[in-house]
Amino acid sequence: MSVTTRIAEIRAREQAATPGHWGTHYDGTGTYYIAAGLRPTPAGTVSDAVVAEVRGEPGDEQTYHDARFIADAREDLAVLLNRVDELEAALAARRTIPQPEAAAAPAQPTGWDQATFRCGQCGTVHTAATEAEYLRLVGDHQAAHELAARLDPVERRGFASVLRVILTAPGLGAEFLALVDQQARQTADEPPF
């Protein structure tokens, strides 16, 4: 799914949600009500509509934070979507102004500038110039973590040593696999890799 499509879907959900300011009301038993048009009156707290309930244990801070997140999302999303509109308009305006260095540069695909991936497990940082490259980097990095988890320390060091040799000479890796496959076909004792 493209970023443009995703933003359009977010915008549609934001527009379809109950309008107005959302607030939270705690009932004292662990339940927070997210309500539109929440206001105090002499008779108690009233609202135009209850949007959601978040249930937890009395005094549970996480339940409070979750309820505040949901209540604030109504206005936060509108602010963020307006900012996206402003940035897209500024970018479109900049594209229409001839830039001296842009005339010599090859055309770049629109809709994607770059994205940075930071791994929460190991702290590795990768930057990608396209959405496809970003998805490949994230997938490869996740697969590397899964492989490392399956190997014991001795296997990891041995595999890393082999990769260091192969990755510095890709032709060597391809030729070695071809040689092993050929020998396996000749001897039929050893299955190809």
Image: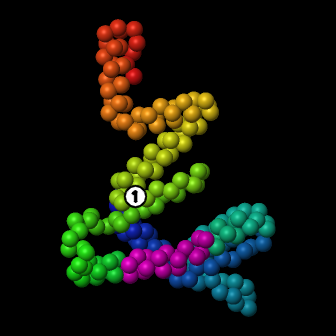
Question: Residue beneath label 1, please?
Answer: 128
Q: Is residue 65 left or right of residue 49?
A: right
Task: Report the magenta residues as a range.
Answer: 69-87
Residue 170, relative to residue 62: is it above or below? above
Residue 78, relative to residue 112: is it above or below? below
Residue 80, relative to residue 180: is it above or below? below
Q: Considering depth in this image, is 59 or 122 the residue closer to the camera?
A: 122
Q: Is residue 75 left or right of residue 188?
A: right
Q: Position of residue 102 (x, y in %)?
A: 24, 74
Q: How is the image coloured?
A: rainbow
Identify the residue shown where x is 62% and y is 33%.
Answer: 153
Q: Position of residue 59 (x, y in %)?
A: 79, 68
Q: Position of residue 78 (x, y in %)?
A: 47, 78
Q: Tell me the kind of residue under disc 1.
A: Ala
**Residue 15 visible:** no
Residue 52, relative to residue 122: is it above or below? below
Identify the residue shown where x is 42% and y is 62%.
Answer: 115
Identify the residue shown where x is 78% and y is 72%.
Answer: 28
For the N terminus, the quadrant is bottom left
Q: In which quarter of the view is residue 182 placed?
A: top left
Q: Is residue 183 left or right of residue 34?
A: left
Q: Secondary structure at mark 1?
A: strand
Q: Position of residue 81 (x, y in %)?
A: 43, 76
Decide whether the magenta segment is chiefly helix, strand or loop: helix
Q: Would residue 158 be counted in the magenta stretch?
A: no
